[in-house]
Image (spheres, grey):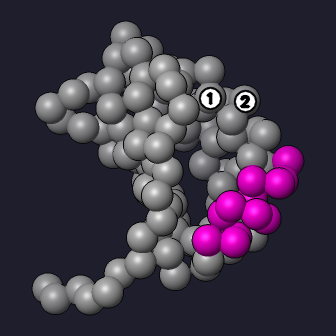
Amino acid sequence: MIMEIAHITIDPANAAAFETAVARAAPVLRAAEGCHAMSLERVIEDPARYRLRVQWTSVEHHMVRFRQSEGFKQWRALAGPFFVGVPEVEHRVIIGQFF
């Protein structure tokens, strides 16, 4: 399993609408092949910044299969209009969970 972390910046005046759009997009991600979990976090120190965390089976499931799907187009149509810039995306793997 890998974790996609997307660093997203929006206009904080649109926070409620953005959060609603992501919630509406959740079923799209839930239906995506290889997607296991999704959460959205807001940065306390900067209300314009969010972290979208999505757990995937592999990087390929995210970057190839999902990105080339109709689901990705639906996700971007819902959430994309709120982005101030291009989200920064990284993939992580848990090396150890100690407590």
In percent of width and height, residue 22 lies at 55, 38
The image shows residue 2, relative to residue 48, as above or below, that is below
Q: Residue at x 50, y 75 (%)?
A: 2
- Residue 28, percent from left and from top: 71, 51
12 to 72, vertically: above or below = above
Q: Which mark is residue 88?
A: none
- As for residue 69 lying within the magenta part, the answer is yes
User: Which percent across, then down, holds residue 21?
Assistant: 57, 30
Task: Give the quadrant of residue 61.
Answer: bottom right
78 relative to 95 in the view: left or right: right
Q: Secondary structure at mark 2?
A: helix
Magenta range is 59-70
In this rendering, does residue 99 appear at all? yes
Quarter of the image for residue 24 reads: top right
Q: Amino acid at mark 2?
A: Ala
Residue at which label 1 appears: 80
